[in-house]
Amino acid sequence: MRVHVVSDVHGAAEALASAGDGADALVCLGDLLLFLDYADHSRGIFPELFGKDNADRMVDLRTARRFDDARALDQELWAGLDRPALIEKAVRKQYAELFAAFPTPTYATYGNVDVPTLWPEYARPGTTVLDGATAEIGGRVFGFVGGGLPTAMRTPYEVDEEAYAAKVAALGKVDVLCSHIPPAVPELCYDTSARRFERGSEALLEAVRSVQPKYALFGHVHQPLVRRTRIGRTECVNVGHFNHTHAPWALQW
């Protein structure tokens, strides 16, 4: 059995279409949408609407952790525009391309920049969406937890800690724990390019310690200080920033 795993697709529909080549199934750990590419400020919904110069300004402010100034710029740019309508139109365009690229079968959960309410309209037969639920793949139980925890970035799908912990607890015993964000291990959460800690989950860390799945797979941190570590018998693996690498992580047994 061979399963390919991707995360942080961020608009890479063409690469996603071949991500399942040679695998029995594809697992996607979220962040399909691309609002703003920190490596190429000309890509994404934000620069399409407001241009690269404003994207440069926004990235500079966020990288400097000047979140109040970033929100002020955001409000200035959106003044007088129908924000919900424009964003939904752009999101729908990306989702149409991305969901069409999923091979069969695909098992997917949401990232923190995804919009879960729209997924049922685009998930075709052969794509199973899971959040706080399990699926058996090749005789192994995979548990899925979508979204992220609250941050100053205020991304679309952030879940409060209690609700997130409830989703983790609902999984029970699994062989492979799949989430968008990592367990709360500092070296797994630190992004060396952004030079900051992303939020990891204490509930995921507790599940790893108590359940001891064979693997804990996640993404979210694009340039982690450490891509993998072991906690007891569990191999914790950042499966990579697919938008950058275009290469899935392979799990074989």
Image (cartoon, rainbow, N blue to C red):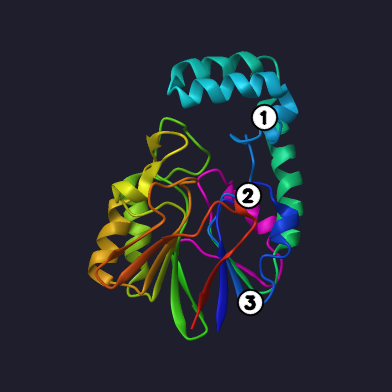
Residue 27, given in percent of the width and then of the height, sits at: 56, 67
**Label 2, on which residue?**
243
Q: Name which residue type carries label 2.
A: Asn
Residue mark closest to the camera, 1 vs 3 = 3
Image position of 227 (left or right of 113): left
The residue at the point 76 percent across, 45 percent down is 93
Q: Secondary structure at mark 2?
A: helix
Disc 3 and disc 2: Cα gap in Å? 19 Å
Within 10 Å of disc 2 (Cα), the crowding (few <14, some 14-19, many 20+) is: many
Position of the N terminus by quadrant: bottom right
Q: Name which residue type carries label 1.
A: Phe
- Image height check: is 250 above or below 197? below
Residue 32, given in percent of the width and then of the height, sits at: 62, 50
Disc 2 and disc 1: Cα gap in Å? 17 Å
**Label 1, on which residue?**
46
Residue bounds of the magenta highlight: 110-131
* N-term-proximal mark, 3 vs 2: 3
Disc 1 and disc 3: Cα gap in Å? 34 Å
Image position of 175 (left or right of 19): left
The residue at the point 73 percent across, 23 percent down is 51
